[in-house]
Image (spheres, rainbow, N blue to C red):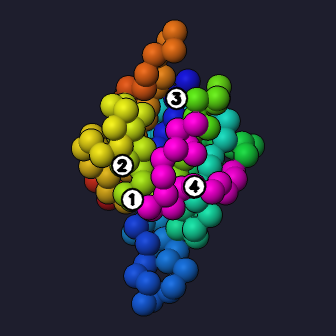
Amino acid sequence: MRIYLVQHGAAVPRDEDPARPLSPSGREDVKRVASFLGRSRLSVARVIHSGKRRALETALLLAEVVGPGSVVEAATGLEPEDSTDRLADAVDGWTEDTVVVGHLPFMGRMVARLVTGNEDASVVHYMPGTVVCLERGGNGGGWTIVWVLRPELLGG
């Protein structure tokens, strides 16, 4: 099973719009990432997001390509400073590939926790729109990073 931990795309500044939707460049970055993932035949059963507008918009753009017909749902516990406990416990019970869209520093701490057991470890450097693919090892094994994709790698 794989999970894809995604930082939402770049958002407009708070003083421009307090809801902080995706900026035009953030929307284009996420579309490029989604298109690349679609060409790679990535497919997921569900897409979870924090409920914040920029995370919802990122989740919808990704779901359109990698999870057509999949469930797109808001979840609690994905805020920037939330504990990783809730998601770590939930992931243990998942059996289907899932995208999780959230915020920093939470996403970086979640990757570190799943891979090393220590959420304070420095494991990956996120930028807006980054996707980190983790895979759970067989026989109750831990999580490993399979790949990391940042929008800058796809040009623009």
Q: Is residue 86 magenta?
A: yes
Distance CA(mark 2)–CA(mark 1): 6 Å
| N-terminal label among 4 and 1 | 4
Residue segment shown in magenta:
72-89
- Please provide percent x and percent y for residue 67: 65, 41
Q: Is residue 46 magenta?
A: no
| N-terminal label among 3 and 4 | 3
Residue, disc 3: 2
Q: Amino acid at mark 2?
A: Gly
Could you classify mark 3 by the number of other residues whose Cα lies within 10 Å: few (under 14), some (14-19), or many (20 or more)? Answer: many
Distance CA(mark 1)–CA(mark 3): 21 Å
| N-terminal label among 3 and 2 | 3
Residue, disc 1: 104
Q: Are marks 3 and 2 in contact (CB under 8 Å)?
A: no
Q: Secondary structure at mark 1?
A: loop
Distance CA(mark 3)–CA(mark 2): 17 Å
Residue name at image x 61 percent, y 38 percent: 90
Q: Give the numbered dot on residue 84.
A: none
Q: Amino acid at mark 4?
A: Gly
Distance CA(mark 4)–CA(mark 1): 13 Å
Question: Quadrant location of residue 122?
Answer: top left
Q: Are marks 2 and 1 in contact (CB under 8 Å)?
A: yes
